Image (cartoon, grey):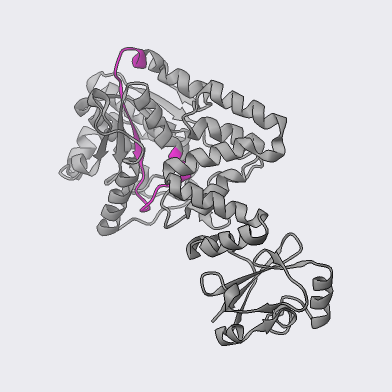
Amino acid sequence: MNFIEELRWRGMIHDIMPGTEEEFAKGITHAYIGFDPTGDSLHIGSLVQIMILVHLQRCGHKPFALVGGATGMVGDPSGKSQERNLLDNDTLQHNLACVQKQLEQFLDFNCGDNSAEVVNNYDWFKNMSFLDFIRDVGKHISVNYMMAKDSVKTRLETGMSFTEFSYQLVQGYDFYWLWKNKKCTVQLGGSDQWGNIVTGTELIRRKEGGEAFAVTTPLIKKADGSKFGKTEGGNVWLDKTKTSPYKFYQYWINASDEDASNYIRIFTLLTKEEIESIEKEHAQAPHLRFLQKTLAKDITTRVHSEEDFEAALNASEILFKKGEEAVNGLKKMPENIFNDVFEGVPQAEVALSEIETGIGVVDALSAKTQFLSSNGEARRALKENAISINKNKVTEDSVLTKDDLINGKYILVQKGKKNYYLIKAV
């Protein structure tokens, strides 16, 4: 496959340096992307760059993932409005190990000439003195050149430390070192990295008279203008302990049609023909959300597992089920997924001993929980057949007992189609 052509039809090219496509046509090209170890997990924003490396390797080229043990100590000013807190070494080392482990999920590190490699820029910076750096790197790049970069210009009024100002030289030297020692002739990254990347190509040219190239990807924007990869709870992480597979799945399944068409090109390995076929099928019955379901299954399975996808799917569908099927599904649902599904639902605590004795449903809805304002309102709702307990319709005579408890502690109350409440036995 032609790597640049693959990125182009997927809408994954923002800027490309002249001569880059010809460079990839020469044979196995060595290229790299840098990953920032400011946290102990990558998020779905980072997944864009991971997919670039996956496509690179599938097209027969050799991917390098640079984890910034050195640059993580400095802080990239690109797109930042203020100075970043620097990490202590123990935190940084922990983050580096976690990020490397995540990268190993997606890339093949044992496939011959184009096996992936992870490199850490601390390895080549740790023995370089400050005087060596300003003599061997700093003298080749003028202050005027550095000041012209957007990442610097946007911060001049609010202020910028020398540490962050020097970041583009540090990243530029990364490219030079990889070009000289690992034959990396191309650097890849997000469009906000263009200034830092071309500093590297300039350094290679000025120090050695060498030639290097660059490709950047667009920063993903959602159709409604909100930020990609963010929810009310913050970032959508690749680590399941930070973002559960259920919430991860929900992020993709809830994408708009326009966004899903964009995401399925960027985040899956489906071919152009397969994607166009999926979109055609989706267009015939958009309400069935075939596009979103295909997208969410593909990404959740690859980032987590088939088992995690099935659990997320079952949890998502439980709200649409009724009767025994729903009850069985709720009772089999692991507590962590149950809590994810019903996060934010109003809750009230009731003594376990009272539930074991038995509580009339009218009392349970009003006096015991205040879900409904009065016994009269509770009775009206029950007469209208509007109340379900654990997805089963109930009447005024119904009594809640320990047999109704899910995971030994919850009872799910539903009024109408959309109003949910949780009784928690304590």
Depth order, front residue of 100/166: 100
In magenta, the rendered stretch is 23-47
- For the residue pair 83 and 277, the one nearer the viewer reads as 277
| In this picture, residue 278 sits left or right of residue 148 | right
Residue lying at the far front in this picture: please name it: 324
Q: Nearer the viewer, residue 295 or 87?
A: 295
Residue displayed at 22% across by 21% down: 208
Q: Give the residue drawn at x 34%, y 38%.
A: 34
Q: Give how far across and how far down residue 118 sits, in percent.
A: 26, 38
Res. 320 image quadrant: bottom right
Q: Is residue 224 visible?
A: yes
Residue 309 x, y percent position in the rendering: 49, 47
| Quadrant position of the N terminus in the picture | top left
In the image, is residue 307 above or below residue 213? below
Q: Is residue 339 visible?
A: no
Work out whether 133 lies above or below 414: above
Quarter-of-image position of residue 68: top left
Nearest to the observer: residue 131 or residue 33? 33
**Figure quadrant of the C terminus:** bottom right
Q: Position of residue 339 (x, y in %)?
A: 54, 64
Res 199 → quadrant: top left
- Residue 21 x, y percent position in the rendering: 40, 15
Rendered residue at 36%/37% (across/down): 106
